[in-house]
Amino acid sequence: MKYCALGLFEKITDPISRRIIIILCLCFFSFSYCFSQTQEQQKELDNLLILNQNNTKSDSTKLIILTKVFRQYMKMRNFEKVDEYVDETAQLAQKLNLRKYSFNAYYRRGLFNHGFNKYQKAEENYFKAITEATALKNLYDVAGCYLSLGALYNEIPDYGKSLEMNQKALDLYQKYGGEGDVANCFTNISEVYQELNQQAKALEYLKKALKVYLKEGEKSRGTAVVNLNMGLAYFTASKQEQLKMEIPPNQRLNIALDYFNKSLKGGEIVEDPDIVAESIKSIGDVYAEMGDNNLALKSYQKAIQISKTADNKTNYSESLYALGDFYKKQKDYDNAVVLLSNSFKVSDENKFSENKKNSAYALSEAYEELGDFDRSLAYYKQYVEIKDQIFNEDKEKEITRQQMRIDFGIKEREYLFRQKITDGELQRQFLLAKQQQQLLILRKQELAISDRDKDLQRINYLTKKHELENARKLQKSDSVSAQLQAIISNKKISSQEQQIRFDWKVKIFLTVAITLVLLTAVIIFFNQRKTTRLNKIINKQKRELEQLSRVKDRIFSVVSHDMRTPVNSLISFIQMLEEGNIEQEKLNRYAASLKNNLTYTSTMMENLLNWAASQMQGFNPYLEELNVQDTTTEVINTLKQHALQKNITVKNNIEPNTFCRADLNMLSLVLRNLISNAIKFTPNQGTVTIDAVSVDDELHIKVSDTGVGMSPAQINHFNKPGYLGSGVSTLGTNKEKGTGLGLLLCRTFISLMDGKIAVNPDYELGSQFIISLKRNTTYN
């Protein structure tokens, strides 16, 4: 008699047999589905290969077919064929000068290898894609490649390179991309700093990203993600990082809770269950640390429900572990075991190594408290195995990172990059990240050694507990003779003695290993600090030499051009006088013009000579007690005629008997340059005012005008500590010329007199220069 499958299934009453049949059916259907999918992919590939073979022309159509072929091989995970057809596509695209196809081929192969953790090949293809995009002048795609490289280096991890690539992507997106792209870069950079446990620095970039996302409103998914990350930054911040964040320790949890609630609200608005689940779990973590167990429990249960419904295995396993660990801390070990076992199972099925390790350790502790030492020991052994597996994976990543760093092409690109870097802050952050990463690696090695020692001790402890428990059960079930007890006791003593000797050897070995690691860390630290200090000195000297070279070129330009004009004018004027047939009116006009040219030339020569003298070694000021009002009056008298030509009023509001310590000639030259500049850039009928104010042990001399003022960029440039002149002269309101060296001389001479000079950025009427010099308190 024949039976259908359903009828046969109903006649099987054994539950085990029924379960086996169900499993076999599921396997059969899964295999059938996979087989049909594979057949469909192979059929599509065969059609593409035939199409490629029939198309013998080397044209854009050929490129489209080749692109589809290697993408089909990517779906089938055939690495060898992917390489073959990507190379063929790239070569043909370069030959036809259709480099968008070669860029697409290299970039997709980079993503393909990146997805399978083939970091070296992925890196190589990303850089090839950058070359193609650069040739196309498509800097937006270049930025995308740098962003992918930043993610790659963060996974290895090589945090220094990750920051470098993300910063490059950020620079390009700020020029050629949209605000959303810039915000994504800020978010990626913040993730690197969070990996380095520099939560304060991560918070800076998250605030920048949030500022961009908020322009899109609360309906932006980016706003929800950034709020979630900001909450995690506050929640996980160490005490040292909290000080950098400038938040009171008792406010950390409240601030974190506020950001998690904002993230939850944003996730609900954009209907993203993943953000909602992770936000609720994080809220539960905050409530648990606050001691509000009821709210923590409700949050964890809700997070489990949402993540399970959304089928997000990562959030689901983490939420199960969070609630299980919560029950364990509340000493509700029965519920803890159920949840932690589920978390361990989900993590094992989906290869979530970190959560699987944490679940195994928590289960070991829970079963120990329940007195089930067999399961406690079994889970602890699994915990050690998983931890060793994670440690080996980290070592493989470290080996990969080192191999990538010693690659010649990478080293050459790093060298060229460092030569081109002009942003000192980026260089400092890059070196700091590398140093931080080295310290993290050393710390991980120390912790691994320490954890191994603790694992051995705990395994020994659980083993002895297990033996004692078995001995206790054996004594309860069957009485043992005194002789047998003595034998067991002797074996235990012998085993303990052997264990003690073994532990002693392990401790000696670990002590020596830790000492070597610490010595290596100290040597690396001091070498790194020395290298950083030398790089700073070299970069500073380089900037100073470059600026001095620009000033020198400006001087040569002034001397070669501006000196020739007044000399030629003087020669022409003399020739006209020799001819003797010039009218008096023309004579007066030419004489006035010649006077102006010679006055400018005289001022220029004086500034040049003073600047040259200030650059000579041994040129030191003679500091004495000067009456500032008298000195200022003398300077104003020398410039009175210049001010009268523009009907400008020069006011000396400095009180009599106002003294300071300065060099007379230097201070006069500085005041003359500042007042002359004020007159030069003030329109007719304007006002120039000189004031002096005593502040503590300093005298502040203020030169203010009602002129055209300075742009914020010019003010910031002048107020920088390393200001060495602009190298460019600007015409005055009546087209007056200058040398471009006046402010440089002011900065140089004020510095030689141990003073300071700056532009007031808040002055709105025109410009206001403030000179700070030491004053003699005896006369005040």
Image: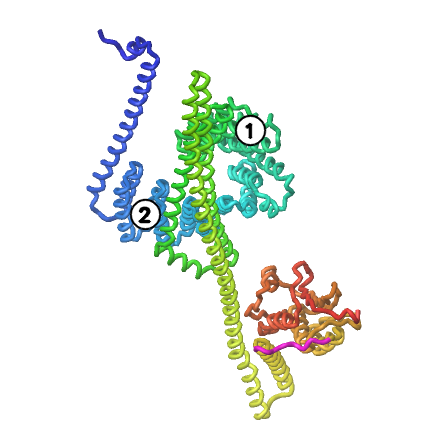
User: Residue at left 23%, top 36%?
Assistant: 47
Locate the C terminus and report the quarter of the image it occupies.
bottom right
Question: Mark 2 is on which residue type?
Answer: Tyr
Is 762 on the left-hand or right-hand side of 111?
Answer: right
Mark carried by residue 751: none
Q: CA distance from mark 2 to mark 1?
A: 58 Å
Sequence-wise, which precedes: disc 2 or disc 1?
2
Q: In this rendering, does residue 180 appear at all? A: no
User: Residue at left 77%, top 69%?
Assistant: 777
For label 1, the residue is: 329
Q: Nearer the viewer, mark 2 or mark 1?
A: 1
Which x, y percent locates residue 662? 69, 74
Residues shaded magenta: 616-624
Which x, y percent locates residue 493? 44, 31
Query: How crowded is the residue under tag 1: few (<14 C-alpha within 10 Å), some, or many (20+)?
Result: few
Which x, y percent locates residue 666? 66, 76
Q: Secondary structure at mark 1?
A: helix
Which x, y percent locates residue 257? 60, 35
Q: In this rendering, does residue 570 appear at all? A: yes
User: Residue at left 41%, top 45%?
Assistant: 156
Question: Mark 1 is on which residue type?
Answer: Lys
Does the magenta-highlighted stretch encompass residue 291?
Answer: no
Instruction: Please state which of residues 219 and 649 is positioned toward the viewer in this rendering.
Output: 219
Numbered marks: total: 2
Does the magenta-highlighted stretch encompass residue 621?
Answer: yes
User: Residue at left 49%, top 65%?
Assistant: 538
Is 253 on the left-hand or right-hand side of 468?
Answer: right
For label 2, the residue is: 101
Predominant SS of the magenta segment: loop
